[in-house]
Amino acid sequence: MQMEPIPVIMRCYFNLIDGYERILDLDGIEVSDLEQARLQAIKAIEELLEEDEGISEDWHSWTLEVTNEDGKILFSIPLYGILH
């Protein structure tokens, strides 16, 4: 009898950072892999855009930084490239 592999669940945190300020995600979300985390990051950015169409000017120096539970940076997405 073959056993199904148990999916690995990890908690990722989506922090907004620039040179002067950090807005930390204290709750995070559970994802099964980095690809799911990347999709959730893009979704979060899209939600920011929906909330405020003028956000691109205010957020040009910001980056969405995705970390694991240990604070290790898994990847980051500069908002300037997404918002323009």
Image (cartoon, rainbow, N blue to C red):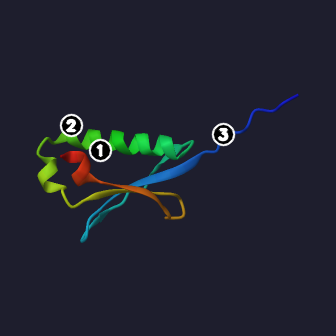
41 and 24: which one is in front?
41
Q: Single out the residue that lies furthest toward the right.
A: 1
Q: Does label 1 or label 3 sit earlier along the sequence?
A: 3
Residue drawn at the location 18% of the way across and 46% of the way down: 84
Q: Does label 2 or label 3 sit earlier along the sequence?
A: 3
Above/below status of 45 relative to 25: above
Res. 77 mark:
none
Quadrant assignment, res 64: bottom left
- In the picture, measured across the screen, residue 21 lies left or right of residue 7, that is left
Place of residue 37 in the rendered image (x, y in percent of width and height, measured from the top left) = 47, 45
Res. 7 mark:
3
Place of residue 26 in the rendered image (x, y in percent of width and height, measured from the top left) = 42, 57
Res. 50 mark:
2
Instruction: Look at mark 1 in the image and give the residue it sits on.
Output: 45
Quadrant assignment, res 9: top right
Total labels: the figure holds 3
Circle 3 — which element? Answer: loop
